[in-house]
Image (tube, rainbow, N blue to C red):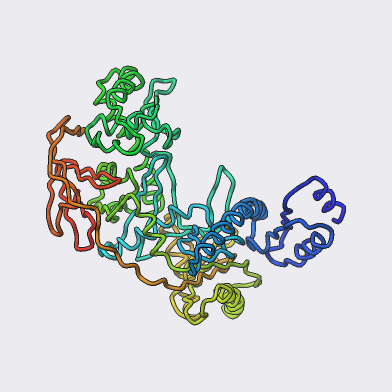
Amino acid sequence: MREAITELDDAGVDSIVVSLLFSYLNDTHEQRVGELIEAETDLNYALSSAVYPEPREYDRSVTTVLNEAVKMTIQEYLGRLDNGITDRGIDVPLNVMHSGGGIFGTDQASTFALRTVLSGPAAGAVACREVTRTERLERAIGLDMGGTSADVSIVEEGGLVRSTEGEINDLPINTPLVDINTVGAGGGSIAWIDAGGGLRVGPQSAGADPGPICYGRGGTQPTVTDANLVLGRIDPDAFLTGDMRPAITEAKQLFEDHVAEPLGKTVSEAAMDVVKVANAKMARELRRVTVERGRDPGEFALVAFGGAGPLQAAEIARDMDMDTLVVPRSPGVFSARGLLLADIRMDESRAYTGATLDAAQVEREFTTLVARLTERFEDQGLDADEVSVARQLDLRYEGQAYELTVTMPDGDFSADRFEEALAQFHEQHEQLYGYDMPDEPLELVTLRVAGTVETPPITDAPSTSGEPAAAREREVYFDETGFVTTPVLDRRAIGVGDEIEGPAIIEESGCTTLLPPNTTAETTSEGNLRIDL
């Protein structure tokens, strides 16, 4: 082992990852290898039993390697940021959003760096949860559509749907995650014709620079944004900012050359097809997280945000037979709002070591986990009494290869609550797979605990965005009608309780909301647009 460590040191590696079989049950050997690395070199090292103490050695190894690779970059960045804040005399704790839908301190972010992956979409999901609560929705699907992709999340029973498994570039990552599903369809997604003459949209994107053709920055490939401009859904003057100059004529011409002509359609028809293909990709992702997982999409409201989400959402929701669409206030920066709303949250897990499914053994192991979790909060200067703890069990039927995570009822551990969780496993299994086997023995694979400390509520500052623009009209294309003279409204001019009949366009800074024909929108007391489809 010493020879291998020395060989790696001589090769110039920056860090060593140690991942040994069954270290999730007994980490003694990994700890010993760590001691040897310290004795023989000055290298950094990471133990898989500390980063991800759970079964499946490949997943554990990859997760630890990725965490260590990201860790070095995160540590450098957070160090500079922390120093910059201190140099400016700002004396406040610095917290970082993580993929589990909470925030934690810089020390935790540096140690568990991989948990910052997908933290932006997770913040959007947190904000979606708030809208679900304030609008008294039972269930909601969050659709966060930006320039390159769309992220889908789910809120059920007042909470976010979570996972412990994700993927980056086809590599598994095992870390606490809000269950975010991403599809390569955004405003900058490029429309193209494949070898068989079929229309495709994405996953290639024009990005922000040069961006869509209509940005006037030299873009040459038609995008979803260009399609919406051709259809009259976006105001050309919206691009009169900074160094952007509207290139409407160029957009129409290149749309004709690259899409309409090969399809044998008019520019408007081709642009509508591009929008429909992009919408179909997002609807397919919504079906994946609902229908394919035993959920009825008609029982959910759609909450649309991001710069492009409200422009596409009504047509997507109709495709999904959904009745309600909510566009929150300031949808273009909605994820940033989620970051401000996020509670302090930390997670711990360990493989279950008991030979049988014994409540007393489970309680002992949970006690150890909770103590470890509480220590992390105390290291961040927080009072252990403020921490709310949720317990989870990864269960499966004997002989199965993968588990379902079941959340135990609130409160301290008890044998009765443990039995309730076991019964809940059968219900979840039936919902997800269409059957259960209540007479089959169960295996407990992993124990999980999540601790949260609530952050203070945020107060919205009065708007300083100036006077609303006067109502006007423009020709807007809809699939069922073609071009229709359509009212264009400034969202700031729509008062609480005002009803807007579609077709209509509602504009605001950084975002446009489309109301197709036969829809009705109303501003709620919370300032959100609630649209009946």
Height in image: 514 above or below 211? below
Asked where in the image residue 260 lies, by quadrant, the reply is top left
Q: Kindly give the residue lying farthest to the front in the view shown.
A: 88
Residue 148 in sight in this render: yes
Position of residue 190 relative to residue 373, above or below, is above
Q: Residue at x 25, y 51 (%)?
A: 325
Q: Assign the N terminus to one quadrant of the image.
A: bottom right
User: Considering depth in this image, is 271 or 360 the residue closer to the camera?
Assistant: 271
Closest to the observer: 171 or 352? 171
Residue 54 position, x and y percent, is 63, 62
Residue at position x 41%, y 48% from top?
151
Q: Position of residue 287 (x, y in %)?
A: 36, 46
Tell me if residue 414 can be seen. no
Q: Position of residue 324 (x, y in %)?
A: 23, 53
Q: Quadrant of residue 50?
A: bottom right
Residue 196 x/y as whole percent: 42, 20
Left or right placement of residue 444 versus residue 513 in this view: right
Nearer to the camera, 458 or 243: 243
Quarter of the view holding residue 68: bottom right
Q: Number of callouts in the render?
A: 0
Q: Residue at x 69, y 66 (%)?
A: 25
Nearer to me, 169 or 254: 254
* Relative height, residue 496 to residue 369 (above, below): above
